[in-house]
Image (cartoon, rainbow, N blue to C red):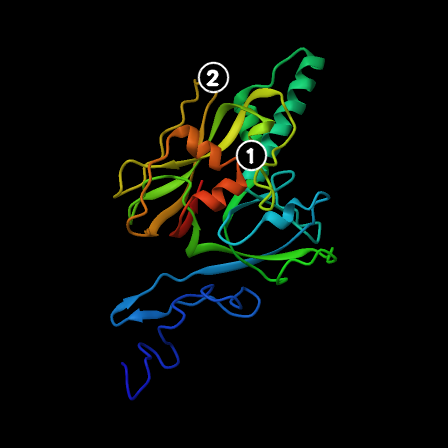
Amino acid sequence: MASGTGLSVGSKGQNTNNPYVGSHSFANSLGSRPRAVNQTLGWQSNATIPYHWSIARWANDLDKNIMNGQIVFLKCNDMTPLLRNRAYTMLNIQMCNYSLYREALSRQRTDVLNSAATESAEILTTILNTYRPVGTVINDMNGKPDESNNADRVINVCVSGRQTTFNIWGELHDGDFIGLKLQMVEVSGTQFNLSLSHHSKVQDDLKSISCYQWIPYRTSDSNRWKTPTPNKHMTHPMHYYELGRVFRCPRGKDYELGDTQRLHFAHHLSDMCSKTHTFEIHINIKC
């Protein structure tokens, strides 16, 4: 109970200033243990669980565009994370989609040489074993970017609980369940922007190809999540990942996005960060 002039509620030492781990710049999985904190009497807030990864630098400095609030993936090999190496390969959704595009181009050339096309179901399985969504970025534990610093970055990620992210889904309401789907779509390299500092810079790959891409997906039912049952007889089967549910949306900032616009924000990093609003998501990833 509150007593004296303090504002503490619940157990001794807990207060309402920092409702969950990750709410301030120095909260991380190294320096603090995730814990549930009582925000109001009789109601316990959702515990946020942060986890840090040491990530490798990219030769073209694309890793420097991985910043707070972005959905991130880990790239895995042989169906297991890169535990043999000191650093992980981390990608935001735009980098991940571009990697899928480049791999599709490479696979197309191989198929031509082998005179045999790779089945979509086999491609889908490979992608799911290689790219794993892990959560949203809380902060960069290395501090502000330093051009002269080539050491591995340490990224603090919210793997479960409340965290802010960009609304690339469109009209959302508190309690909505949202996720990503892997779907075969037609894309070209010029649709991708992977840099925050250069709004008009796009990749120079002109070739258009049908390939799997991560696309924002939300259920039409705000009370429960029901992942569509994959149809094994489809020519290009899809797969759905549940990321979690909407915890809190900003009022008066609703906007509807069509499939083309959602895919655009999943390709264009600069537009995603400058043209969409942020909201609080409760991360609870289910594949």
Which residue: 53% across, 65% down? 28
Q: Residue under circle 2?
A: 235
Left or right of 4 on screen, residue 154: right
In the orientation shown, which residue stands out farthest toward the bottom?
4
Q: Amino acid at mark 1?
A: Asn
User: Does residue 53 lie above or below 109 as drawn?
Assistant: below
Label located before the other in sequence (2 or 1): 1
Using the rendered view, name the quadrant where residue 76 is placed. Answer: top right
Left or right of 42 on screen, residue 148: right
Which residue: 55% across, 38% down? 94
Quadrant of the drawing holding the C terminus: top left
Quadrant of the drawing holding the N terminus: bottom left
Q: Residue under circle 1?
A: 97
Using the rendered view, name the quadrant where residue 228 is placed. Answer: top left
Between 165 and 112, which is closer to the camera in this rendering? 165
Say which element carries label 2. loop
Which residue: 28% across, 82% down? 2
Residue 124, x across and y down, in percent: 53, 28
Left or right of 8 on screen, residue 276: right
Residue 22, x across and y down, in percent: 47, 63
Residue 71, x across and y down, in percent: 50, 46
